[in-house]
Image: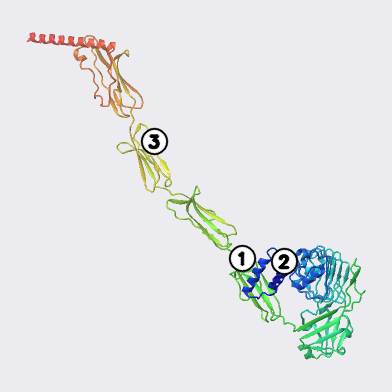
């Protein structure tokens, strides 16, 4: 036990001697650390309180007061002592009754006892308790009775109405003036509150000189009791009157105690006699102290109470007399925009000269304060004053401008416009190389609002230079009018071949497909004449039998063709066809030479020469492939040979006759 005693003393020394040298404190802490590593520590720092606990529990003088020790307490009674700190009492969780009488309590060293759930009775008679102690008692919900009388610093016990189990309360001879809280105490049935002495610690109350009713003829000042604050008030709002007995009244006017010969008192007022005008005009203070006239039975008792007493008691109040203020001129507070247009009604502030005023800005929808006036606070004067708050439109939400192609691709960085709410904005298209605006947005111009807005310019490719498509012959002559292709830059184009009657494409250009550019382009299709249908030449007898194979002439459309008759022995041309020469067309043509048998006796001259067309066949005419002679063709050959022999014989005979005749 000797070790424990040393430890306890060491700890107390550390608490009450904070100004020891650093080296000494460290040495003591080191010693304590070594000696108390496995030791219990007292939860009660106050030595006198420790001694009281040991005595109450009959412990050894060196016993350490731990939490476990405090839990052994079931009741605690303290008379006059030197205890200053009641810390540790909160661990007496089994205590049911605490009595502390005649012991000054420091509210800052009185612990929170809300954890003492078994505590039902507490007595703090004559302990110099104050309202802070009352607030701490209000947390002990198990309390059934409280005696805290003869503590004049206690002026308000209304928080005790929150105690759910409180049945009896003794607050006699304190300073409580208002008992309306009784209506809220759920189980309270006994209240002892006689002899309340109120107002002694109250600050002086300011009272306007005009409240002192002065009669210049009678030279009296009348003070209505209705002007006196914080009078005793019963649970039902009733205020008992002051005593009218001069012996129960103490009155000091401007530092001079008024004798009974200068006071007149009735239920509602007090009159001071023999007051000269200058005394009235220059008076600065007075003190009123009197007993209440409220014997038991003159006031109501709450229903359900077995005992209720608020009798007797005194009222004490000092007053400071102030001159009545002079009404100041109004201060007009304006709320305007930058053009001085009114945004909210003018507010008028009123007060007395030299009293302070404070103007307030307003929250005005869609507006923000731009300028705070210099005179938002000041003093009322005899002149009208104006305070002007200037507002500007608050910033609207941004307007984002996009520049996109038809697919929504960005062509230029978006721009963001900002401005004040309801102010106009204006956007414009951008000059973008190779692009033109296809669609101007409907909201290209508008007003800033409280919502984000977007403006989208839609672009399309700019018109490219035209492409001219020509359809020409080999000589460069247009066969049909040229065509023009139009399109946007970089858009694809494709030219097409034209079907031109009588012509066929000879050369297809390389640039029939491509992209439109900013330079003019040409596409030239070269055509040549189409081949005409063939011309078939036949040599027939009158019966339609062929004398020789058909010949076929070919050539380009509209080119000329020319045929010629053939000589066949024993045959003579009977009919020359009308189309022996002509032009190739798109239709097949046939040219037919008709022959007939030579008549007997026909002279050679009649047979020769065979018929020929006037013009030879054109170079383009072609004879069809040779074939073996047909039957008629062989016979014609034999006849031709015979004819030649006959003709030779005839010539020889004629020549001989001519010789003889000579």
Quadrant containing the C terminus is top left
Name the one closer to the observer, 359 or 554.
Answer: 359
Please state which of residues 528 and 544 is positioned toward the viewer in this rendering. Answer: 528
- The residue that mark 1 highlights is 367
Q: Which is more N-terminal, label 3 or label 1?
A: 1
Secondary structure type for disc 3: loop
Is residue 300 depicted above or below 243 in this figure? above
Q: Nearer the viewer, residue 89 or 651?
A: 89
Q: CA distance from mark 2 to mark 3?
A: 116 Å
Quote the CA–CA distance across marks 2 and 1.
66 Å
Q: For numbered disc 1, what is the local secondary structure?
A: strand
Q: Residue furthest right?
A: 297
Q: Choose the circle earlier in sequence order: 2 or 3.
A: 2
In the rendered image of this protein, does residue 407 appear above or below residue 38?
Answer: above
Image location (x, y in percent) of residue 32: 67, 68
Mark 2 element type: loop
Give the distance between the C-alpha atoms of the residues marked 1 and 3, in whole angstroms. 72 Å
**Extreme residue toward the front, this view:** 2
> Quadrant of residue 468 in the image?
top left
Whole-percent x and y of residue 155?
A: 80, 74
Residue pointed to by mark 3: 498
């Amino acid at each position: 036990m000797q070790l424990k005693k040393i430890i306890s003393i060491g700890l107390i020394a550390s608490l009450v001697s904070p100004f020891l040298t650093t080296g000494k404190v460290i040495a003591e802490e080191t010693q304590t650390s070594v000696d108390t590593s496995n030791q219990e520590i007292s939860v009660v720092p106050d030595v006198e309180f420790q001694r009281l606990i040991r005595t109450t529990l009959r412990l050894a003088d060196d016993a350490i007061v731990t939490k476990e020790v405090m839990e052994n307490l079931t009741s605690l009674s303290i008379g006059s002592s030197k205890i200053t700190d009641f810390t540790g009492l909160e661990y007496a969780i089994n205590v049911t009754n605490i009595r502390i009488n005649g012991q000054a309590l420091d509210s800052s060293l009185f612990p929170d006892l809300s954890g003492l759930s078994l505590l039902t009775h507490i007595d703090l008679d004559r302990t110099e308790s104050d309202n802070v102690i009352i607030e701490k008692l209000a947390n002990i919900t198990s309390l059934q009775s409280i005696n805290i009388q003869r503590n004049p610093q206690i002026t308000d016990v209304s928080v005790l109405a929150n105690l759910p189990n409180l049945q009896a309360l003794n607050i006699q001879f304190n300073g409580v003036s208002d008992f309306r809280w009784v209506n809220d105490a759920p189980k309270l049935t006994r209240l002892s509150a006689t002899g309340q002495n109120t107002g002694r610690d109250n600050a002086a109350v300011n009272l306007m000189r005009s409240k002192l009713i002065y009669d210049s003829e009678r030279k009296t000042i009348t003070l209505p009791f209705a002007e006196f604050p914080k009078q005793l008030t019963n649970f039902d709002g009733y205020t008992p009157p002051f005593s009218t007995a001069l012996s129960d009244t103490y009155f000091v006017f401007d530092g001079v105690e008024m004798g009974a010969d200068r006071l007149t008192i009735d239920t509602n007022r007090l009159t001071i006699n023999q007051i000269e005008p200058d005394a009235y005009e220059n008076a600065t203070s007075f003190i009123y102290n009197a007993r209440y006239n409220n014997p038991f039975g003159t006031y109501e008792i709450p229903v359900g109470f077995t005992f209720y007493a608020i009798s007797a008691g005194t009222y004490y109040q000092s007053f400071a007399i102030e001159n009545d203020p002079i009404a100041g001129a109004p201060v007009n507070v304006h709320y305007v925009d930058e053009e001085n247009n009114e945004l909210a009604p003018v507010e008028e502030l009123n007060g007395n000269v030299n009293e302070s005023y404070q103007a307030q800005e307003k929250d005005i929808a869609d507006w923000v304060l731009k300028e705070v006036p210099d005179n938002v606070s000041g003093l009322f004067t005899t002149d009208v004053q104006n305070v002007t708050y200037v507002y500007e439109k608050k910033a609207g939400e941004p307007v984002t401008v996009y520049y996109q192609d038809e697919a929504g691709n960005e062509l230029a960085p978006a721009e963001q416009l900002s401005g004040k709410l309801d102010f106009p904005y204006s956007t414009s298209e951008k000059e973008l190389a190779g692009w033109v605006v296809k669609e101007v947005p409907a909201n290209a111009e508008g007003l800033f609002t409280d919502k984000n807005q977007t403006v989208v310019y839609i672009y399309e490719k700019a018109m490219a230079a035209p492409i001219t498509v020509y359809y020409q012959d080999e000589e460069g002559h247009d066969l049909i009018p040229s065509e023009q292709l139009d399109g946007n830059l970089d858009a694809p184009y494709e030219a097409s071949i034209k079907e031109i009657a009588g012509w066929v494409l000879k050369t297809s250009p390389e640039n029939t497909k491509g992209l439109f550019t900013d330079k003019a382009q040409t596409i030239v299709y070269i055509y040549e004449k189409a081949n005409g249908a063939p011309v078939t030449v036949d040599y027939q007898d009158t019966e339609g039998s062929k004398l020789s194979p058909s010949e076929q002439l070919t050539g380009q459309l509209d080119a000329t063709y020319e045929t010629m008759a053939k000589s066949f022995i024993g045959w003579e041309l009977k009919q020359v066809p009308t189309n022996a020469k002509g032009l190739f067309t798109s239709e097949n043509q046939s040219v037919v030479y008709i022959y007939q048998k030579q008549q007997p006796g026909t002279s050679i001259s009649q047979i020769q020469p065979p018929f020929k067309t006037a013009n030879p066949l054109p170079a383009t005419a072609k004879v069809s492939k040779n074939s073996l002679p047909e039957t008629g063709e062989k016979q014609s050959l034999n006849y031709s040979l015979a004819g030649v022999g006959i003709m030779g014989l005839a010539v020889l005979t004629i020549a001989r006759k001519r010789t003889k005749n000579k």
